[in-house]
Amino acid sequence: MPADTDLAKQNDELIRFTNVTKSFGDNTVLDDLCFSVRPGRHVTLIGPSGSGKTTILRLLMTLASPDSGTIDVNGGRLFPADEKERREVRKKIGMVFQQFNLFPNMTVLRNITEAPVRVLGLSKDEAEERARELLDLVGLADRADARPSQLSGGQQQRVAIARALAMRPQVLLLDEVTSALDPELVAGVLDVLRDIARTTDITMLCVTHEMNFARDISDEVLMFDAGKVIESGPPEKIFSEPEHERTREFLSAVL
Ligand code: ADP
C-alpha cells in the first residue's frame, strides 16, 4: 500500500486529496489541492461559482480524472488506480445531483432497488424492504408505486436521496441539491438531509448556496477560491469571523 494511503489511515481520514490538479484546457480548476475529511464529518464546500467545488465531487464519483495528485477514500486509492481498484473504492460513495436524475420509466420503488440488486447483489425482497425503510425516512412511504413524473421536484429529490442511501455508501456527496427546486419545496429536502446528518454516521460532502443550511449541518466549512482551499474551520468561525478577505467578500454577496 502506498505510503500516503497509510498516512491517511493513521490520521483517521476517510477522504484525502493530495496535491490534486485538474485543468480544462488552460483553465486550472483545481490547483495543487490538499484537504482531508474525517469519518462521520459533515463538510460543506463554499466559494464563488467556478472555484472547482463541483469538480471535486465529480472526481470522487470518478466522473472525471485528475491530471496529477492522489485521491484516497477509506484507505483505498481512487486515483491513480487500476479500474478494478477504483470500482471497489467508488462503491463507498453516493451522490445526489442538482437535477435528481431519476429513471423516468421506473416506479419510485424500482428506482431505489435497481442498483442494490444489480450492483450489490441483494435479493429483490431485501432491496425492497430496505427501499421502503428509506422511503419512510424521506417521508414518502406512500409513493412507492408512483412514477417520478407524478411527484413534485422536492419529492423527486427525496427519492434521489433514498436511492443514494440504498447503496449504503460511507460518503454522501450533495451537489446543490436544492437549486433546481421551487422555493417552497426547499425546506422539506433540507429537513430530510438534516435528519440524515443527525441520525446516521454517514460522511457528507456538500456543495450548497444555502448558507443557513451549511451553518446548521456542517462540522466544517471549506472556503474555495481559484481551485484551492483558502480558509477552513467550524461554521461559527467561517460565517462570523472569516479571516480571509475573499471569504468576507463572498459571504457578504450571498448572505
Ligand atoms: P463550482 O462548482 O465551484 O462552480 P466547477 O467545479 O463546476 O465550479 O467548475 C470550475 C471550472 O471548471 C469552471 O470554470 C467550469 O467552466 C470548468 N469546467 C467544469 N467542467 C468542465 C468540463 N467538463 N469542460 C470544460 N470546463 C469545465
Image (cartoon, helix red, strand yellow):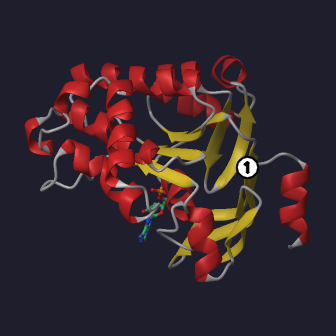
114 and 203: which is toward the camera: 114
Residue at 47% x, 68% y is: 63
Image x and y of residue 146, in percent: 12, 38
**For residue 114, above or below residue 76:** above
The number of numbered discs placed on residues in the rendered structure image is 1
Q: Is residue 142 left or right of residue 61?
A: left
Depth check: 193 or 235 in front? 193
Is 106 placed left or right of 170 in the picture?
A: left
Residue occupying the point 47% across, 60% down:
120
In the figure, is residue 15 to the left or right of 51? Answer: right
Query: What is the quadrant of residue 44 in the picture?
Result: top right
Q: Decide if residue 143 is on the left or right side of residue 241.
A: left
Residue 99 visible within the image = no
Residue in the image at 56% along x and 22% along y: 199
Q: Quadrant of residue 85?
A: bottom right
Kind of element beneath mark 1: loop
Q: Position of residue 37 (x, y in %)?
A: 72, 44
Q: Quadrant of ligand 1?
A: bottom left
For the residue pair 141 and 129, the one nearer the viewer reads as 129
Q: Is residue 20 above or below residue 34?
A: below
Residue 245 appears in the rendering: yes
Whole-percent x and y of residue 68?
A: 70, 76
Q: Amino acid at mark 1?
A: Leu
Quarter holding the N terminus is bottom right
| Above or below, comparing residue 13 to residue 120 in the picture | above
- Of 30 and 173, the residue lying toward us: 173
- Which residue has dot 1 on it? 14
Seen as rendered, the residue at the extreme bottom is 82
